[in-house]
Image: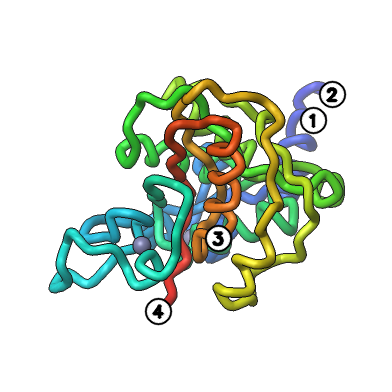
Amino acid sequence: MIHSLLSRWIDATLAIAYPERCQLCEVHPATSPQGFVCRACQKKLRPTKPPWCLHCGLPIESNRNLDSSCLNCREANWQFHQARSVFTAQGPIREAIHRYKYDQDEFFEAFLRQCCRKGRALTPANYDALIPIPLHPTKERERGFNQATRFAAFFSEISTIPIKANLLKRIRFTETQTHLPRSQRLRNVKGSFHCPTGLNRNRFLLIDDVMTTGATASAAALALKKAGARQVDVLTLARALPF
Ligand SMILES: [Zn+2]
Ligand SMILES: [Zn+2]
């Protein structure tokens, strides 16, 4: 009797703390294994698909020359070989990533894990390791975790590619780049990364949450190439669109 009362009380407390409702629209039911994102919100996800810029993966209009790079890439000398993103950074994925990072809404984790696993179709499997783009240690201490490390772990579960989280170091603290124009982002991240270990011509896949211009990924790729990496590609969960 006491036991059943206690378990009902625990269930009721959990239901208040984590209501079985979508935490994005707050309308439809959604469970813990769904990461509290309902089916209707999941249908709003926009996977990136061709035609895209062959270099940075930015979706481009279908009447453009498919062999061409986007305007962004033609002006830049990116140090990564190829970048791909699972979704365009809109709607549910954008909000879930933002709240996971800045509001510590960890209940989205099951949803984000499923999203990361969809990246497998976008990338070849023959990398020597996944490398999460590191945060500066001060920023990681403030936030309590690096989202890129978690996303790399989710992708590693499905791809079985090992993670090397400590190869790449972020040696300069940079303020958030969200509102900076591209030229300033490039200057801002220059020299931000360092890889102290020799890399023996290996192939790596950098992992991050969102790619905007590509400046951060390029600076990270350059540090790996200086240390001897043969090829560096990039996979992000979301891709910010410039339009
Ligand atoms: Zn919803
Ligand atoms: Zn491009």
**Distance from label 4 to label 2 (Cα)?**
60 Å
Question: Who comes first in sequence, dot 3 or dot 4?
Answer: 3
Q: Which residue is mark 4?
A: 243
Mark 4 near mark 2, Cβ–Cβ under 8 Å?
no
Q: Within 10 Å of the Cα at label 3, are there few (<14), some (14-19), or many (20+) other Cα atoms?
A: many
Q: Quadrant of ligand 2?
A: bottom left
* Amino acid of disc 4: Phe
Identify the residue at image location x=58%, y=38%: 226
**Foreground pick, 117 / 197:** 197
Q: Is mark 1 within 8 Å of ligand 1?
A: no
* Amino acid of disc 1: Leu
**Distance from label 3 to label 4 (Cα)?**
18 Å
The answer to whether residue 97 is left or right of residue 68 is: right
**Foreground pick, 90 / 21:** 90
Quadrant placement of the C terminus: bottom left
Quadrant assignment, res 233: top left
Q: Which residue is mark 3?
A: 215
Provide residue 211's location: percent of width, then percent of height. Answer: 51, 58
* Amino acid of disc 2: Ile
> Looking at the image, is mark 4 or mark 2 nearer the viewer?
4
Question: Who comes first in sequence, dot 1 or dot 3?
Answer: 1
**Distance from label 4 to label 1 (Cα)?**
56 Å
Q: Within 10 Å of the Cα at label 1, are there few (<14), some (14-19), or many (20+) other Cα atoms?
A: few
The answer to whether residue 161 is left or right of residue 167 is: left
